[in-house]
Image: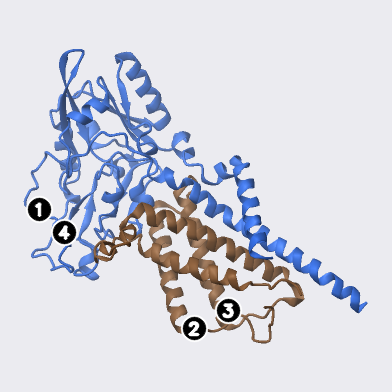
Amino acid sequence: MPDPLFPRWQKRLLLLAALGLALTGMGQMPIFSRYYIADIPGLHWLGDFEITAALHLVLAAVLVCLLAVFATTWIGAGANRPQLTAAGRQRIALYGALAITGLVRVLQNGSHPLVAPMQVRYLDWTHLGLAMGLLAFALVRGRRPAVAESYVGE
Amino acid sequence: MNRRAFLRTLGTAGTALATAPAVATTLIARDAAAASGEQLATLYDLSKCVGCGSCVAACRDAHAADYPEPKKPFPKMYPARVKAEDFSDKRDLDTRLTPYNWLFIQSATVSRNGAPVTVNMPRRCMHCTHPPCVELCPWGSAVRHADGAVAIDASICLGGSKCRTVCPWAIPQRQTGVGLYLDLLPAFAGNGVMYKCDRCHSRVAAGGKPACLEACPYEVQTIGPRAEIIAAAHAMAKSIGGFIYGETENGGTNTLYVSPVPFADLNAALKTGPGQPGLHAAADVMGKEQNLATAVLMAPIAGIAAGLLRLAGRFKNAAPKEDDHA
């Protein structure tokens, strides 16, 4: 019996990373302090930009790594590759675009800026818009399977 | 691949990363642009500054059109902890940084070799080589231009003041009742626009010099490629037995000061507070995240490696079955 192509614990880790990224991503805006959320005992860290930015990067590394694992195994599975559903393709597009815009933003903060200074806003807005899109997708179509039901890889 | 094997793969990738600093350095080398001469820096010889205020007046003249004209009354904001910040009735205030005063003179008197020494310091944005206000702005309204000038675009700034929170010197100042937030959700999001020195970016881009530099009658300030300015600062400090501020603070800034007295002494003697920055040993805000940023950039490589290992494991496990069918 071969290993499952997409182990359940990795899918759960991906979900955990995505939820953490959504939370710490929102924390990049000054809203948790403004709306008293950081005043709740145990949630003070949500109002600390240094902490939320560091956590955002840690979780991004986990998410991007898992996405690369999934992509590599899916592409490399050859004829055994499970067929993606429409929801699966949409999920890949959203996650992929989010990861790419995030990676470009990380490069931007280094010494390899790929985007002109006055255009960085469009990169940020795209990243934010994609996150909102993924949230809407999760609410509306989040429970639909990503691969065809005939696939019994797990 | 099980959890242990996956984590082992990540560990292997991590080790490879640790042993390949050249790769990581290439990916996120933070100081290449600053060292290349692309970024311009300014140097203040504080031993020459008499605190005449010519630079402050010149700055006001040069940026008169950039100052905010807020609409009053301000929108009521929710929740109540969100306070309006209004300097529109204090436009002449020049003892601190405000949305209408992007440069002010700070003075401190300290004892040096038994004699009192007064040092005057023109204070404005330090124009960091890796400005946290820019790199952490969630909206892209703070930008660092290729020449090293850091600016805030008033047309899209929402005035959340994160830039001030993450700035080691809390330089940007907020004016309520102006800007994009008025057209969005004035009661619930934003609180005006943040303002600070942009080192006269448009003047410099057109081949000129910052207004404060041109107006100074004592030639306190000079501008040039950062590497040359650092060399000049060291030469100046050596010749007067002085001290440098800005070369390493917050990981390096494009504003350097040379003083005849230690900056720690000046910092202790300064009056600091809102709009009145100190001269402390500022830690490198963005440098703390450098390793994490590198990990993010290396993550796809680790993921591909883990995926290939999983595929190899699957093929290995599947091989005996194929033999059985043969």
Amino acid marked by disc 2: Arg
Q: Few, some or many C-alpha atoms within 10 Å of disc 4 (few <14, some 14-19, many ≥20)?
A: many
| Whole-number angstrom distance, CA of label 4 to CA of label 1 | 9 Å
**Disc 4 designates what residue?**
B176
**Disc 1 designates what residue?**
B88
Tell me the blue chain.
B
Establish if A89 lies above or below B223. below
The verdict on a common chain for dots 4 and 1 is yes
| Whole-number angstrom distance, CA of label 1 to CA of label 2 | 50 Å
Label 1 secondary element: loop
- Pick the residue in front: B261 or B54: B261
Quarter of the rendering containing residue B154: bottom left
Between circles 4 and 2, the one closer to the viewer is 2
Label 3 secondary element: helix
**Disc 3 designates what residue?**
A88
x and y percent of residue B231 in the render? Answer: 40, 23
x and y percent of residue B255 in the render? Answer: 31, 34
From the viewer's perspective, is B134 left or right of A107?
left
